[in-house]
Amino acid sequence: MTTRPSTGTNPGTGLAAGTTGSERRAGDAADVAQVAVQAASLVPGVSVVRPAAVRLDDRSVGLDLHLITWYGHSVPRIAETVRALVAERVAIQTGLSVAVVTVTVDDLLVPGVDGPGAGAGAPEDG
């Protein structure tokens, strides 16, 4: 079991105060993923966001995200909006340069066919 020292965090980042490049811990990838998921979830038409990969180095990060979207929204527009918003939020909240955000849309939910909780892992009726 790995524990993280309680050195405090930088406001709004969730990263340890004074953390730089080589001092980053494995938990930082989870922090970056959380920021990315929160940002992507703000985009209209996005139902579910799953981080597939977070690649960190000393100054930059690369992200792969998988989405489930709702029918009736432009998939290319959603993907581009998610990419831009995630890159902006991750850069602001972590201080890292965002090298790439790859967005993959895995599924499309249809209103009236897929329930409101269908993409969120809600149990099916039956």
Image (cartoon, grey):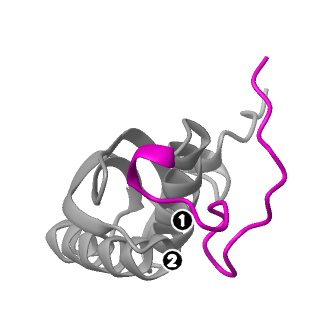
Residue at the (35%, 64%) spot, across then down: 71
Residue 86 is left or right of residue 19, and the answer is left
Q: How many labels does the image show?
A: 2
Residue 102 is left or right of residue 73, and the answer is left
Decide which of 43, 108 is in the foreground and name it.
43
Name the amino acid type tagged 1: Val
Residue 78 in the image: x percent, y percent?
Answer: 27, 73
Q: In which quarter of the image is residue 53?
A: top left
What residue is pinned by disc 2?
93
Q: Quadrant of residue 59?
A: bottom left
What residue is pinned by disc 1?
35
Residue 11 in magenta stretch: yes
Residue 68 is left or right of residue 76, and the answer is right
* SS under mark 2: helix
Residue 118 in the image: x percent, y percent?
Answer: 61, 47
Q: What stretch is highlighted in magenta?
A: 1-23
Decide which of 26, 74 is in the foreground and name it.
26
